[in-house]
Amino acid sequence: MLNIHKIMFFNTMIFGTLIVISAYSWFSMWIGLEINLLSIIPLLKSPKSLYPSEASMKYFITQSLASTILLLAVLLMSNLNEFMPQNSSLFLIILINSALLMKIGMAPFHWWFPEVIEGLSWNSSFLLLTWQKLGPMIILTYNLTINFFIFVIIFSSLVSGIWGVNQISLRKILAYSSINHMAWMLASILYFKTIWLTYFIIYTLISVNIIVMFKYLNIFWLKQLFSSMNQSKMKKLFFILNFLSLAGLPPFLGFMPKWLITNNLIENNFYTVSIILIASTLLPLFFYMRMTFSTLTFSTNEVLLKTEEKFNFKIILLNFFSLSGLLTCTNIYNLF
């Protein structure tokens, strides 16, 4: 049962993000980000363990630093009478973008993100992987610095793949996977800002499936996969297919936004960025396949007798939409 204060903080967290989305001034956006930050800190803490408290303190310090840099840049713009980013100096725009990139944990400001995720529960990790990226990403769409964004996209895609290969923690693997997906989302707002919302919704849906499954099985480490998937072939199937969808392999739903972004990048002559993004996706695909194949090959004590599996219908429905979504979306696109 949820506590009343958690429901209140959850509502104010959503309210803070809505302020950011609907704000018409930089100061209002900053206030929305601060309301969101102060609301999520109590949600991250847990009385059962000290690790969430430590992670929430790290998160608060990092976000406070980013908010300070953002407020400094906004005040400098107001002193220079440059309220529109088009009229501002390149230094101020990069300063604002750097603060926002630090808030969402993209490289080269990613150093805090895996460490914070590592100490949180699956519910809190889901909030940081999805909802907390919405507000800063919307502000980033107002400040397009293409050369700086291209550097961040390339750096994030490479760092997430290289650093994620050696991880044995499932939360850190999802954190580096999130950095890689954020690079794709950032690439989508260079010229076509509507695709990133599609990507964000699809990424959220796939993340829900994976995190619900991890929470359902109560696993946090790679070695726990070997014994957790033995009792049910349906769990094993959903686990493998969701990670293939997260990697962006056809015919799963995760392939569609990457397909659209690659197509638009090539149409706008971003050949180098598209090649690097596609090549850097192979590294996350490698550690996804390592997880899925280890689940298949190392499960030697699987129950051969038919047992009654209690699997939540909502989980099955979510997985159905996630795994058959590309076929459905393609048919709808062809019809209309």
Image (spheres, helix red, strand yellow):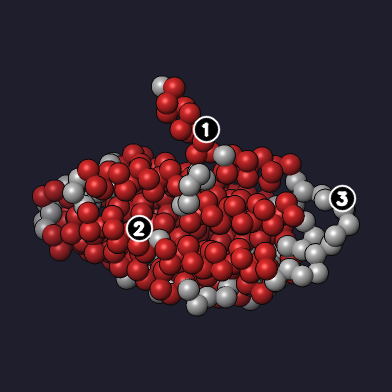
Image disc number at residue 328: 1
Q: Amino acid at mark 2?
A: Ile
Q: Residue at left 77%, top 70%?
A: 300
Residue at which label 3 appears: 308
Q: Amino acid at mark 3?
A: Glu
Q: Amino acid at mark 1?
A: Thr
In the rendered image, residue 289, in percent from the top left (x then y), is placed at: 55, 64
Residue at which label 2 appears: 278
Q: CA distance from mark 1 to mark 3?
A: 31 Å
In the rendered image, residue 285, in percent from the top left (x then y), is placed at: 48, 62
Q: CA distance from mark 3 to mark 2?
A: 42 Å
Q: Residue at left 66%, top 60%?
A: 214
Quick one: label 2 or label 1, which is nearer the N terminus?
Answer: 2
Quick one: label 1 or label 3, which is nearer the N terminus?
Answer: 3
- Judged from the image, the secondary structure of the residue bearing numbered disc 2 is helix
Q: Are marks 2 and 1 in contact (CB under 8 Å)?
A: no
Looking at the image, can residue 51 be seen? yes
Q: Residue at left 63%, top 72%?
A: 222
Quick one: label 3 or label 2, which is nearer the N terminus?
Answer: 2
- Judged from the image, the secondary structure of the residue bearing numbered disc 1 is helix
Between 109 and 261, the one lying in front of the other is 261
Which image quadrant: the C terminus?
Answer: top left
Between 63 and 215, the one lying in front of the other is 215
Q: Residue at left 40%, top 45%?
A: 257
